[in-house]
Amino acid sequence: MLQLSTCQAFGTDCKDLVSMIQDPGAWPNFSTELDELQKLKSRFPEFSIVFIPRTENVSSDSLAKIARSFHRNLYYIGCSIPVWFPRPPQA
């Protein structure tokens, strides 16, 4: 049986994004975007976002670069890397 999680946890390599979410008042130029984010966050009982340096998340960084190279919208939700995605180089 499929069970949905009520917790949304995200990691990003953008320190500014984490700062914006933690202290939206300090980023008035992004108030419209942060208001939209607040609306989305309110739909989940639990929400977290943390900073993860690129050097500690090489696989995700490689996947993001590959996805950007497609020059079209790419949507994928899953727990594993799709078989049609080229594998990132191993360190």
Image (tube, rainbow, N blue to C red):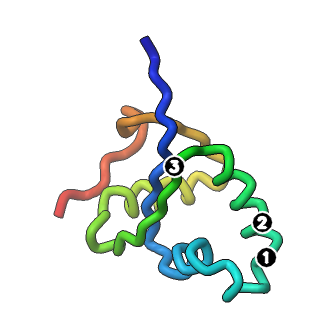
The label on residue 35 is: 2
Would you place residue 50 above or below residue 73 in this image? Answer: below
Q: Which residue is mark 1?
A: 31
The secondary structure type at the circle numbered 3 is strand
Taking depth in this image into account, of 64 and 84 the one nearest to the observer is 64
The crowding category of the residue bearing disc 3, from other C-alpha atoms within 10 Å (few below 14, some 14 to 19, many at least 20), is few
Would you place residue 13 above or below residue 46 in this image? Answer: below
Residue 58 locus on image (x, y percent): 30, 64
Q: Nearer the viewer, mark 2 or mark 3?
A: 3
The secondary structure type at the circle numbered 1 is helix
- Residue at left offset 54%, top offset 38%: 76
Q: Amino acid at mark 2?
A: Asp
Q: Specify the farthest residue to the right.
A: 32
Q: Specify the farthest residue to the front.
A: 45
Q: Does the CB distance between marks 3 and 1 fall below 8 Å?
A: no
Q: Does the CB distance between marks 1 and 2 fall below 8 Å?
A: yes
Quarter of the image containing the C terminus? bottom left
Residue 64 locus on image (x, y percent): 47, 58
Q: Amino acid at mark 3?
A: Glu
- Residue at left offset 36%, top offset 70%: 52
Disc with the residue nearer the chain's start (2 vs 3) = 2
Disc with the residue nearer the chain's start (3 vs 1) = 1
- Residue at left offset 49%, top offset 28%: 4
Q: Which residue is mark 3?
A: 46
Q: Tell me: 2 left or right of 21.
A: left
Q: Tell me: 70 left or right of 90.
A: right
